[in-house]
């Protein structure tokens, strides 16, 4: 096999030169295109951050308005795609429904999928940004047995999504500005995170020159796993169990530390952050404010805070440099907003979309890109012969 380096999990292997997101894991630093995440969370919007990630610079007011308008004009999906949702069982998890729907989108735009045609890449970018929230809301409505709502383009990105999720045709839906603002910030915090599992998947699939819809659909499936985006749903499952069974957080922590049944403290630990995840810090501050306003589950927030406090003072976690990650507190906020646990990872997917698109475009434009094709160390049988019976 020659000079093959063995690096399971790509812990020490870079697969890309990227100018999009910078992380300093030792110091808990995250920047999109050079801008600290804290500044963006305070001053920017999700749609502006999407522009920044994809095009590399903050937009001028005119550029932002043109981009925003363009996205708003593409929010509807083909009527035929609606019937697609009837093919799933009523209790279907919305993540596989979403990834299937995103994959299906490419069949409606089969004449504009050339990864090397700039205009086609541009229209695919806009279509994905615009239609994924609509598809996500359809998946949600389907699971509730409620009628799907058409997008309403006088609303901004996040407000439109909230209305499609929680509105009903019989009444006007009043958007709560605190909820919309909080969701917009949460989406922004998820917008990119360099070469994580789903983004690497998007790049790897795209490196075969598969189109953007196919690549993003694969990314959604990678995000679904509980060690990645699925962790936000798993955190709530963990808090629910602790609360329901009346387990003391201390007892639960002992189980984690003894690695009983492979139990992990979900929402803790990160491949790159060996310090407090800066996104988690922002979410943690928000959690108090939002839960107070929206009337969330205080007891679960209390449990989460006790788990965090115990973990940060415990040798097991200190030695391994395990800190809360972005998923630790987000679920509590999503729940207070009215989203069921099944939707949490879908919200992550909507947030991560600009990052996937930006990274896919960077990969396609990079002359150094080659088809992704890891090597292996073969440990199987040496040659043997088929028995002559
Ligand atoms: N609870 C208990 N122990 C842990 C945890 C945890 N959450 N995370 C890591 N460890 C231990 C692990 O058992 C290992 O111990 P030892 O050295 O004794 O074998 C050590 O810490 C190093 O862990 P690792 O699994 O080698 O680390 P990794 O970089 O491969 O995994 C991770 C990173 C995020 C998958 C992992 O920390 C984890 O499973 N966390 C829980 C799931 C989670 O919250 N995922 C969300 C990640 S952040 C955003 C996102 O991608 O969604």
Image (cartoon, grey):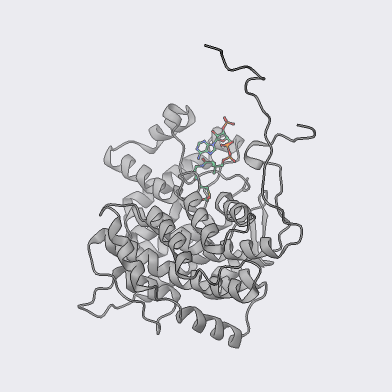
Up-down relation of residue 170 to residue 242 (above or below): below
Up-down relation of residue 266 to residue 356 (above or below): above
Please name whichever residue, 337 or 107, is drawn nearer the observer in this view of the structure.
107
Residue at x 62% of width, y 17% of height? 385
The quarter of the picture where the N terminus appears is top right
Decide if residue 38 is on the left or right side of residue 147. Answer: right
Residue at x 36% of width, y 67% of height? 81
Residue 369 visible within the image: yes
Residue 158: image location, x then y, percent: 43, 73
Decide if residue 373 is on the left or right side of residue 142. Answer: right
- Quadrant position of residue 369: bottom right
Residue 370: image location, x then y, percent: 72, 53
Residue 50: image location, x then y, percent: 56, 71
Please name whichever residue, 251 or 154, is drawn nearer the observer in this view of the structure.
154
Q: Residue furthest right?
A: 3
Q: Residue furthest top?
A: 389
Residue at x 34% of width, y 58% of height? 335
Q: Residue furthest left?
A: 170
Q: Quadrant of ligand 1?
A: top right
Up-down relation of residue 42 to residue 324 (above or below): below
- Quadrant position of residue 192: bottom right
Up-down relation of residue 87 to residue 373 (above or below): below
Residue 231: image location, x then y, percent: 45, 47
- Quadrant position of residue 65: bottom right
Numbered-mark total? 0
Q: Residue furthest bottom?
A: 62
Please name whichever residue, 223 or 120, is drawn nearer the observer in this view of the structure.
120
Residue at x 79% of width, y 32% of height? 2
Residue 293 visible within the image: no
């Amino acid at each position: 096999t020659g000079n093959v380096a063995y690096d399971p999990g790509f812990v020490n292997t870079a697969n890309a030169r990227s100018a999009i997101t910078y992380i300093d894991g030792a110091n808990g630093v995250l920047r999109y295109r050079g801008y600290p995440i804290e500044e963006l969370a305070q001053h920017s919007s999700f749609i502006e951050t999407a522009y920044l990630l994809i095009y590399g610079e903050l937009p001028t007011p005119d550029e932002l308005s043109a981009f925003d308008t363009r996205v708003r004009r593409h929010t509807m999906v083909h009527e035929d795609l609606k019937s697609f949702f009837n093919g799933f069982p009523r209790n279907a998890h919305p993540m596989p429904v979403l990834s299937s729907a995103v994959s299906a989108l490419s069949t409606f735009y089969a004449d504009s999928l050339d990864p090397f045609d700039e205009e086609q890449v541009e229209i695919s970018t806009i279509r994905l940004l615009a239609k994924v929230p609509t598809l996500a809301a359809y998946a949600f409505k389907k699971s509730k047995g409620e009628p799907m709502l058409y997008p309403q383009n006088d609303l901004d990105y996040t407000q439109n999504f909230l209305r499609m999720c929680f509105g009903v045709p019989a009444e006007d839906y009043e958007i709560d500005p605190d909820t919309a603002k909080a969701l917009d910030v949460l989406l922004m915090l998820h917008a990119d995170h360099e070469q994580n599992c789903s983004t690497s998947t998007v790049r790897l699939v795209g490196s075969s020159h598969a189109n953007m819809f196919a690549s993003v659909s694969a990314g959604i499936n990678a995000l679904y796993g509980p060690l990645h985006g699925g962790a936000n749903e798993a955190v709530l499952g963990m808090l629910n169990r602790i609360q329901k069974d009346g387990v003391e957080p201390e007892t639960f922590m002992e189980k984690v530390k003894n690695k009983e049944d492979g139990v992990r403290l979900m929402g803790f630990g990160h491949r790159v952050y060996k310090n407090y995840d800066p996104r988690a810090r922002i979410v943690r501050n928000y959690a108090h404010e939002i839960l107070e306003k929206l009337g969330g589950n205080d007891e679960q927030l209390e449990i989460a805070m006790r788990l965090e406090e115990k973990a940060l003072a415990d040798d097991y976690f200190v030695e391994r440099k395990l800190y809360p990650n972005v998923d630790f507190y987000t679920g509590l906020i999503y729940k207070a907003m009215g989203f069921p646990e099944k939707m949490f990872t879908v919200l992550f997917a909507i947030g991560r979309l600009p990052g996937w698109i930006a990274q896919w475009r960077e990969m396609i434009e990079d002359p150094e890109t080659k088809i992704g094709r890891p090597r292996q160390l073969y440990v199987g049988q040496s040659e043997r012969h088929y028995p002559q019976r």
